[in-house]
Image (cartoon, grey):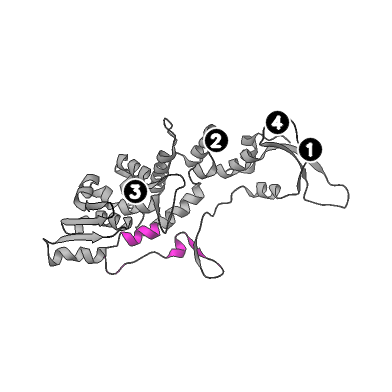
Amino acid sequence: MICLAAQAPQRCPDAKLVFFTPDRDVLVLAVAHYDKLCERTSLSMVSGILDIEKIWRALGKEKAQALPIFHAFTGADNVGKFSGIGKTKWFQQYIKVDMHLPRALMKLPVEGDLAQEVKDKLKEFVCLRYCPKGVCIKSIPNLRWYMFCKQLAESNKLPPTLGALKEHIQRVRLQCRVWCQATMTQQHPFEPLNFGYYKDTGGQMLPITTKVLPAPQAISRWSNANVKPIAPLKDVHAEEVTYSVQNSVRATQNALTMKTVTLKMKTAMMMCNLCSCDIRTFFNKSKLLF
């Protein structure tokens, strides 16, 4: 649709072009590629007729060109979206940011590895949206930890982990590579299997959520050991339970070595997910006593 519309100015420069569609993706692409369309271009939606030129000028050329990438990054059909934050809030943040973000977004459809400064800018943008009022944290792990400790935020209200965000950015690159070539008759898309997707045993292509383990391997092995709760304690926090952890290694048929630990399970496992740290750092932070 956009490809055919981009050819209209060459045939009839004074033509009036109207898109009839309820699809928001078409609106985004029309704004981004407006400089290649007829000057009198509009889009007819259920809410009414939108003048593309007014939107394009209000955003400015750079933010308008980066709009499809912003749209894919903040949630599109084939990419996924951030939990708990709608498109309106993301767009309000996009209007306020400086030009460094649109320039970083424009690097996503380009071939080759992303520069670290581009990744850092995207992480900063995510933190800006998730940060509570009056708080300025630019590190995603630190922000997740702050929101969990200070606000007791549930997992679906936290920003994504670094591993999940990395795969999300890969899928965004795949999608916006196509959208940024919308005016071209011959596109050169990326290979999906190299950008956030994999094939299961049935040959179906599925998104990769993350390649990072949810917790250090030592913690996973320990949590999968034979764990038996003993008599519940009175007057303790609901999340605090005493467990008797049976050593999983059986050297002989003799009595097994038993060790009793007091562990705040929810806090500890969340810390594993929040922090990409080694086993020693994990136990130091969680203040476990053995």
Residue drawn where x is 41% and y is 57% of the image: 77
Going by the numbered disc 2, the residue's amino acid type is Leu
SS at mark 3?
Answer: helix
- The residue nearer to you, when weighing 163 against 78, is 78
Q: Is tag 3's residue or tag 1's residue first in the polypeptide sequence? A: 3
SS at mark 2?
Answer: loop
Going by the numbered disc 1, the residue's amino acid type is Ala
Residue drawn where x is 32% and y is 60% of the image: 179
Q: In this view, does 11 lie above or below 86?
A: below
Gap in angstroms between the C-alphas marked 2 and 4: 18 Å
Residue 152: numbered disc = 2
Find residue 91 and report its image quarter.
top left
In this rendering, the count of numbered labels is 4
Q: Is tag 1's residue or tag 2's residue first in the polypeptide sequence? A: 2
Q: Is tag 3's residue or tag 4's residue first in the polypeptide sequence? A: 3
Q: Name the residue under label 4.
A: 236
Nearest to the eye among marks 3 and 1: give it. Answer: 1
Q: How crowded is mark 1: few (under 14 residues within 10 Å), some or many (20 or more)?
A: few
